[in-house]
Image (spheres, rainbow, N blue to C red):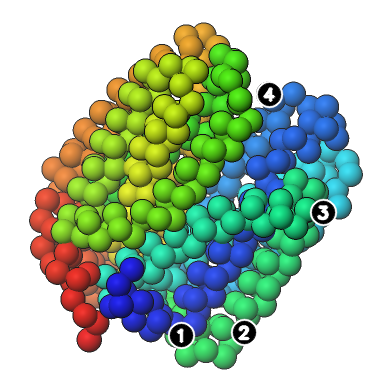
Amino acid sequence: MDRQWWQSLYRLPPLIWIVLIGSFFGRGTYFMVWPFLAILLHEKFALGPGNIGIILSVSAMASALLGFYVGAMSDRYGRRNILILGTAINAVAFFILAVAESLSTFVLSITLCSIGRAIWEPPAGALFGDLVPDKKCRELALQFRYFLINVGAALGPIVGVWAGISAQQSTFGLTGVSYLLLCLAFIWAFSYSVAGKHASAQKHTETSFASTVQVLRQDRVFLVVVFANILALFIYAHMDTSLVQYLTQMQAPALVGLISSMILVNALTIVLLQFPLLRLMRALCVNNRMMVGIIILAAGQVWLALNPIDWLYGWLGATFIVSVAEAILFPNMSVQVDRMAPSHLRGSYFGASSFYSLGWSSAPLAGGFIIEWAGGSALYWGMFVLCGFVLILYRYSRQLNRTLPVNPSQPDQLAEVHAEMHEARLEMGDIADREGAALSKPAA
């Protein structure tokens, strides 16, 4: 990042920095042991892959529905209490997970982990729009959050192995401490910081859950984008569990070393290339960036489908291509939601983006069946075709006229909402307008 970008980040409110730092430490301690949770469940309770998958997938799917509801409630009642509640639940859940001995306790704590994250993530994303009025600075902050999450995910396992605490159940206690500190930091910031007091006062009490659902149902552009992003995550997720299953089934040589190397390539690609890619693509509107990411993701699927099972460097090359697509797609998904959300429904729109996890959580189950019935090559050719369908959805979303109904009790919102929709359409469509220039200009 250049000097102007660092200056923009430096001026962010303390409450935003709490979200950024909390995301880094929470995800870092989380990844010290969460990837090994399946091993823990197998060793402790002799569970098979199917039962473990059900436990993890069902909780993830349930959290998607909860995240949507909680996001809408944060618009009505404000962000403060929901953020504090979500991080407190996460702290309790991980403390329980650190000492759990029975299967029922494990299932309870895993469910609470998903619930806590579903509660605090949507309002945390909405806070960026509440407190950072400049769209370009807000985009940079959202990009930086995804960067910190990936740095935490990359460093967590490394630090855990170095400290000798990786893959140990008790390490979940560190994640619990991270969320407890984040909860306390939210309590302090909302009570004593200027930005926190401003955020606490932002409530749209006239907005009900039913009216929010009605708005989202009629916002066809957003619904198409959400469906496209669910499919994009479904495609990407086959780089994870499905690929491991495929390589295991085909008895790839040096499997453990290969998987470790692929994880390292993925983490390094995201950490090193996210901001150079952002700078390279700054002249493109958000929608066009997403389409470029999908095209690169499609190229990765072709490589995965054609790569010989014993060509180890080929798997690393395919991992690099898919990781480049991830570096473009994932942070811009948050920017996409931020661009499309009306100010009085920002929490609801970020809550609706929780449905993206449906694509991620369903991929291992679908991938396992396809690999078993048709083979890994067929899986990735199918994902290549699905990438084409996602591109069609993105192009279709730009052809739709976008209008939003306004709460009849608040007719004064009409001009404001229509202005927001017009500006969002310019930024999401073919017109890149001021985006590239604004990112490259020195901050005022």
Q: Give residue 195's mark.
A: 1
Q: Of label 2 and label 4, which has the lower sequence position? A: 4
Question: In the image, residue 118 lies at what x, y percent?
Answer: 57, 54
Q: Which residue is mark 3?
A: 170
**Looking at the image, which is closer to me, 134 or 213?**
134
Q: In terms of sequence position, does the residue under pointer 4 or pointer 3 come before the other? A: 4
Q: CA distance from mark 1 to mark 4?
A: 47 Å
Q: Which labelled disc corresponds to residue 382? A: none
What amino acid type should be assigned to the residue bearing mark 3? Ser
Quadrant position of the C terminus in the picture: bottom left
Q: Is residue 10 visible?
A: yes
Q: Let me know if residue 211 appears in the view.
A: no
Percent x, y of residue 122: 49, 60
As shown in the figure, which amino acid type bears the numbered disc 1? Ala
Which badge, 1 or 4, comes first in the chain's sequence?
Answer: 4
Q: Would you identify the image quadrant in which residue 11 lies?
A: bottom left
